[in-house]
Amino acid sequence: MQEQLQKRVYDLLKYKNNNPAEKVVMNFGTMTDFTWDKMYIIGSYSSGLEANKKLGFRWSNKDGLLTTDFQNLFVFVTGQRVVQVVNYTGFLDLQGRSYFTSTNSKFEVLEQDNDRMNKLIHFLDE
């Protein structure tokens, strides 16, 4: 299950890179085939303690949970349980959001910048 979602994310990023003029949207509300309440994004260089604080429960005891630039984890949670984690390397603009739900988890994929990194921009449902 985790590999399937990870592959979907990768495939959409690859598609955008091969079709830069086309609008590409990642909608985690429709991309996921499992139940989740909230999706948190744990950013670069976050520790396990920082991740636990953001999630509101103990999940990780790693000191260096994420150790490289632009590395992010999309952490899907039901209640106080992590049900899925997806890796994403690239830029994010979360527009001040601390978490997302299945009804407000759409991201537009922008083309690669000079560092060959994708950028996901969150936009609110209309």
Image (cartoon, rainbow, N blue to C red):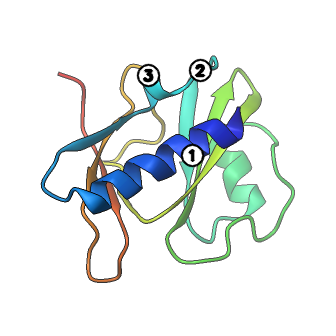
Residue kind at label 2, given as amino acid type: Asp
Q: Residue at x 22, y 56 (%)?
A: 19
| Closer to viewer: mark 3 or mark 1 | 1
Can you say whether 79 is above or below 82 in the image? above
Badge count: 3
Q: Is residue 32 left or right of residue 114?
A: right
| Residues tagged 2 and 3 counted as in contact (Cβ below 8 A) | no
Q: Which mark identifies residue 30?
A: 3
Of 65 and 7, the residue lying toward us: 7
Q: Residue at x 29, y 69 (%)?
A: 112
Residue most extreme to the bottom: 114
Q: Position of residue 107 (x, y in %)?
A: 32, 41
Query: Counting residues from the N terminus, which is met first, the one under dot 2 or under dot 1?
Result: 1
Residue that carries the numbered disc 2 in the rendered image: 33
Disc 3 packing (10 Å; few <14; some 14–19; many ≥20): few
Residue kind at label 3, given as amino acid type: Thr
Q: CA distance from mark 3 to mark 1?
A: 15 Å
Query: Counting residues from the N terminus, which is met first, the one under dot 3 or under dot 1?
Result: 1
Residue most extreme to the front: 18
Residue that carries the numbered disc 1 in the rendered image: 7
Q: Residue at x 48, y 28 (%)?
A: 31
Residue 101 visible: no
